[in-house]
Image (tube, grey):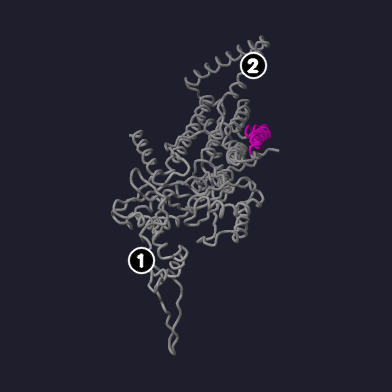
Amino acid sequence: MNIAEIFIRRPVMTTLVMLGVLIFGIMSYRLLPVNDLPNVDFPTILVNANLPGASPETMAAAVATPLEKEFSTIAGLDSMSSANAQGVSQITLQFNLERDIDAAAQDVQSAIAKAARQLPPEMPVPPWFRKVNPADQAVLYLNLRSTLVPLSVLDEYAQTIIAQRISMISGVAQVNVYGSQKYAVRIQLDPKALASRGIGIDEVTTAIQNSNVNLPTGTLSGRHQTQTIVSSGQLYNADAYRPMIVAFRQGAPVRLDQLGRILNSVENDKVASWYIDQRSIGLAIQRQPGTNTIEVVDSIKKLLPSLQAQLPASVELINMYDRSKSIRESVNDVKFTLILAIILVVLVIFFFLRNLSATIIPSLALPMSIVATFSVMYFMDFSLNNLSLMALILCVGFVVDDAIVMLENIVRHMEKGQPVHEASLIGSKEISFTILSMTLSLAAVFIPVLFMGGILGRLFREFAVTISAAILVSGFVSLSLTPMLCNRFLRPPQTLQHSRIYWASERFFTGMLKAYDWSLKKVLNHRPATMVVTGLLLAATIYLFMISPKGFIPSEDTGQIFAITEAAQGISFENMVRHQKVLADIVQCGLS
């Protein structure tokens, strides 16, 4: 049976099939997302809980502990860690890689519902969670600063104008606001004033809650119409809180401004963000898994001028960090390497075949195999990243082997004097099974990578599938397109007129053959020495493997440095700010 015969006898069909493969591959390439590494989603859930005013110890004992007890009963939970700060608890749940993240999220929701009765009733909202990928960094960092506008107003701009609008962009998962300074009224009570009037903090709290409500008051119904009663029961600033009556003592009302200071402030004044040496509001934008990082960043950048136009002239919107820059540069470098590898392979083929038509025929297997692989990557939800492009670079040398073997066997029959058509049929029939076995055996080498477990297996799965698909497609091209082109465009060697370059290269190859013959005889005549040298090379290889540095993935220089600072436990916020400013000055001096 000759697999290639149908393609040789039907060149129009073969051409249309290859054009279809080429068109679908190009379309798939344009739709593939671009990232630095394959998308590996860790089944991780982050649970947040807020209790304003509570100390870290209270958050750990009253909020984090009841939740952790319920979370520990969830199946497939690998690790659980919590971090407690002033009024905030964060619990990170890491599940097995085989655990479905959606099913785990349902279990977490059920656990939160079970723990609700044990949580403090003063919590403004129940604990909430979100599915996160710890390895997925923010793709864009923005900064909002102004020398005239208060931080609380900047925070409102960031929350209501910028964050909400950017979240609507396709591919954006969420926008985190750092250094948030949300407006709030802060009441600082004087213990002496409370004690002298015999008023407790609970009475002040109750009075504030009762006086600051926004509930329906009722309706007035008449014969012809009904009127809704609207009452303004919500207080918005410090001036509205000051005359509030807290209690009555000795027949006289005690107002709130008699018990302490009422200030227009922010919800949490122990959180701050700086840009160089100026207080600001930061925004970190994360993309959705599987989306194109470059397209998401470009869409956000197109929106920034319109957002800046909605802000006052004194407010500046700054692009602090763009992750797509390093991704563009790394992917472009790999693309350049891929193109360079293709050019070098074609030049090597031409150098040895020394025939333009014979060089073009196997060389066409290169773009066809790589472009067709893009279709496989698209249907497998892969992305263009450093690992998948590296697989294409490695397969450049593989995909032309089958085509060269097919070409050489057909040329061999033509050199014996057979016509081109008969040489193509006979040569392709003889070599078809060999090419099929070569292709399958080479693709089988990467099958173990597909069955690797853990994070490493998920990370290299795209690499294995991509290079296997390219090899399989190259085998198909070598059994279809290559023999058809040989039948149509090859000329008998007897009719070719060779130039001086051909004969000069022929003498060079003859010299190489003689040198190889001489070296082979020397090796066969000194077998013990050959085995000793081979053993030494094997021992040196093992030794170098043992002393070579090892790591998870190669380190990458993106041009950014991220640092985390820690201070002594119990340090005050003001003292921490001073230390941070000193550290920032040192970094500024080092960079200048």
What kind of element bears circle 2?
A: helix
Q: Is residue 228 above or below residue 540?
A: below
Instruction: Identify the residue under disc 1.
Output: 242
User: Along the horizontal axis of the image, is 431 left or right of 166?
Assistant: right
How far across and down, in percent of the image, does residue 47 sit? 55, 53
Q: To which residue does mark 2 refer?
A: 534
* Residue drawn at point x = 42 percent, y = 82 percent: 227
Task: Examine the structure image and report whether residue 446 is included in the region drawn in magenta.
Answer: yes
Quadrant hosting residue 565:
top left
Q: Position of residue 111 (x, y in %)?
A: 62, 57
Residue kind at label 1, given as amino acid type: Arg
Relative image position of residue 303 (x, y in whole percent): 38, 54
Q: Which residues are magenta?
A: 422-449
Q: Quadrant of residue 545?
A: top right
Horizontal side of residue 114 vs 581, given as left or right: right
Kindly tell me whether residue 180 is visible in this rendering.
yes
